[in-house]
Image: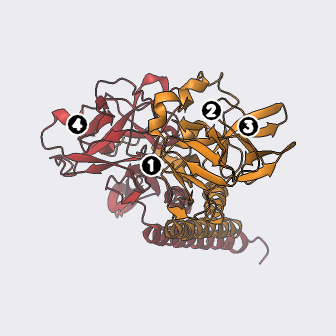
Chain colours: A orange, B red
């Protein structure tokens, strides 16, 4: 059978997936702390066809002819470069200015609370029991301190000051000060993490299979290492999606899709010709 | 029998092969490091036709002389003899990813016999531990920290060892030296093929050689540079591929028309010459 058609259709499916990825990047262009994803292609299997053994014509390449059956997505990689900072002047907005550093959020999972990681630093206060208030993220999940506990203050608190080492000082109107240490974790290899949402990450479930441990991926910044923390109060990190680049990619992929669909129609016409021999 | 009947058939098969090959080129217009496959279509070995003649000599017993008078050579068809990749440099595209390393050709020595320049490749560990070669610099770190191709083949350094890195936060110099912080971890193994046409393209577009290719650094006149954060795009020219595809399609159609003409001649032979009743 004519392989032209299958080659083109295989590739069209994969181009569609690439369009999905580009679409997701574009839709998150205003999501704080979003990191763009890039997909790349690779060739599919190659097949060899042998020529007539009696063929003695001079040639450069090894015997036979070889060609592939299309292209497929090989990998998607996250670009961990820091996005542009947006100054908001809100004292519970925090931006991490060093790449690969992440806030820790305590999220209620199916098996109890678990730590997830994000660079989205717009935090809020949420009333708890009594006059306790807890620091939460945009989804209402508690922000974790360096001991792994939810950050809580005894209210009312109205002034917040962030120290360069990630210590948050909350002051009440009567002059009382409470401190909390924001947990900052370095994810050395963000591409290994599982994406929970566009901005939240968690450790992969198949770490044993991959023969790695938590310490291979994560480094908690505590003690003297807190000097490495790059954090800014009153600002948020914008997404690092490059609008122009994504649009260019979108057009390119769409045109490739068209080219491949032309290939399908040419193959169809060829099959028509074969049918019309008689 | 009509000699040209199978000639036209073989022409259709060859043109079909050609569209299959072009469809694969078109499919890989977005594959990093892909090298366009070119086809050469060749005529079947020629036959020599002669006319068998009988000359009557006007003597008493009717003496006959038999002889051959030459008519000329005739070709009996066509086939796709060879597929050869075109090893020209693809354009560079910035991706900002540290694991994207474009290998840029500098001046390369020209082979005296083929009059074509050689080609340089990254050295990978292919299937069965054999060396494989690729121009695609779209790499990744696997969970254990080894630098691999997108398909998971280990990238080898100049001594043929795998390259292990603590994270993707590394720098690569123009000469292909991988630095992590202030340390030099490894040097990327760059291989040189004086006659790239002799390489065989197999599994997922990797090139294989009969004997291992030499290191490019040991060869005089070989210049290259490695660009981190870039990929080399496919060198497929979409408009040219589409034009070629249309040409192949029309040639296929023309052969089909010839086939139909033969069929009509045969129909005449069957229904008119062979008619029994007036």
Helix, strand or loop at mark 1: loop
Q: CA distance from mark 2 to mark 1?
A: 31 Å
Q: CA distance from mark 4 to mark 3?
A: 57 Å
Q: CA distance from mark 3 to mark 1?
A: 35 Å
Of circles 4 and 1, the one toward us is 1
**Which residue is labeled 4 in the image?**
B216
What subunit carries mark 4?
B
**Which residue is labeled 2 in the image?**
A146
Q: CA distance from mark 4 to mark 1?
A: 25 Å
In the image, is residue A188 above or below residue B73? above
Of circles 3 and 1, the one toward us is 3
Comparing A132 with A36, the one in front is: A132
**Which residue is labeled 3 in the image?**
A150
Helix, strand or loop at mark 4: helix
CB under 8 Å between discs 2 and 1? no
* Mark 2 surroundings: few (<14), some (14-19) or many (≥20) residues within 10 A: many
**Where does residue A7 sit, x and y in percent of width and height?**
61, 55
In the rendered image, residues at marks 3 and 2 fall on the same chain: yes
Please give the name of the residue rendered at 36% of the width and 57% of the height, measured from the top-left corner: B90
In the image, is residue A278 above or below residue B187? below
What subunit carries mark 1?
B
**Which residue is labeled 1 in the image?**
B97
What subunit carries mark 2?
A
Quarter of the image holding residue B270? bottom right
In the rendered image, residues at marks 4 and 3 fall on the same chain: no
**Where does residue A216 sit, x and y in percent of width and height?**
54, 26
């Amino acid at each position: 059978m004519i392989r032209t058609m299958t080659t083109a259709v295989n590739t069209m499916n994969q181009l569609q997936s690439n369009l999905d990825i580009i679409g997701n990047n574009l839709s998150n262009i205003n999501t704080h702390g979003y990191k763009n994803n890039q997909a790349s292609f690779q060739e599919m299997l190659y097949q060899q066809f042998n020529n007539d053994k009696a063929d003695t014509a001079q040639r450069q390449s090894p015997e036979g002819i070889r060609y592939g059956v299309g292209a497929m997505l090989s990998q998607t990689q996250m670009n961990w470069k820091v996005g542009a900072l947006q100054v908001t002047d809100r004292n519970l907005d925090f931006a991490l200015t060093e790449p690969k550093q992440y806030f820790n959020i305590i999220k209620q999972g199916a098996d109890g609370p678990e730590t997830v990681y994000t660079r989205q630093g717009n935090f809020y206060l949420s009333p708890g029991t009594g006059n306790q208030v807890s620091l939460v993220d945009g989804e209402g999940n508690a922000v974790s301190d360096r001991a792994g506990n939810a950050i809580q203050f005894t209210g009312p608190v109205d002034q917040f000051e962030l120290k360069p080492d990630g210590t948050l000082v909350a002051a009440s109107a009567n002059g009382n000060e409470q401190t909390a240490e924001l947990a900052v974790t370095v994810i050395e290899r963000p591409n290994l993490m599982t994406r929970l949402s566009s901005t939240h990450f968690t450790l992969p479930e198949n770490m044993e299979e991959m023969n790695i441990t938590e310490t291979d991926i994560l480094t908690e910044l505590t003690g003297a290492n807190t000097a490495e923390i790059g954090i800014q109060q009153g600002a948020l990190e914008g997404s690092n999606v490059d609008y122009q680049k994504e649009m260019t990619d979108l057009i390119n992929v769409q045109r490739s899709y068209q080219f491949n669909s032309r290939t399908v129609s040419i193959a169809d016409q060829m099959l028509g010709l074969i049918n019309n021999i008689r | 029998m009509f000699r040209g009947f199978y000639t036209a058939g073989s022409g259709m098969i060859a043109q079909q092969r050609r569209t299959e090959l072009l469809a694969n080129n078109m499919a890989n217009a977005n594959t990093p490091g892909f090298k366009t496959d070119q086809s050469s279509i060749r005529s079947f070995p020629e036959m020599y036709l002669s006319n068998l003649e009988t000359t009557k000599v006007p003597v008493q017993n009717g003496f006959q002389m038999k002889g051959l008078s030459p008519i000329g050579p005739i070709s009996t068809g066509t086939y796709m003899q060879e597929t050869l990749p075109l090893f020209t440099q693809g354009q560079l595209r910035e991706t900002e990813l540290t694991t994207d390393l474009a290998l840029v050709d500098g001046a390369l020595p020209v082979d005296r016999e083929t009059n074509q320049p050689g080609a340089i490749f990254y050295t990978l560990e292919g299937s069965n531990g054999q060396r494989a070669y690729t121009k695609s610099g779209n790499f990744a770190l696997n969970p254990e920290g080894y630098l691999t191709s997108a398909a998971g083949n280990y990238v080898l350094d100049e001594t043929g060892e795998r390259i292990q890195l603590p994270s993707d936060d590394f720098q690569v110099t123009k000469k292909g030296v991988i630095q992590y912080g202030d340390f030099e971890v490894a040097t990327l193994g760059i291989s040189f093929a004086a006659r790239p046409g002799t390489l065989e393209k197999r599994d997922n577009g990797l090139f294989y050689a009969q004997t291992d290719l030499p290191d490019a650094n040991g060869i005089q006149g070989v210049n290259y540079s490695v660009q981190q954060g870039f990929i080399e795009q496919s060198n497929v020219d979409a408009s040219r591929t589409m034009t070629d595809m249309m040409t192949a399609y029309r040639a296929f159609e023309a052969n089909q028309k010839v086939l139909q003409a033969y069929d009509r001649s045969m129909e005449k032979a069957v229904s008119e010459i062979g008619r029994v009743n007036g």
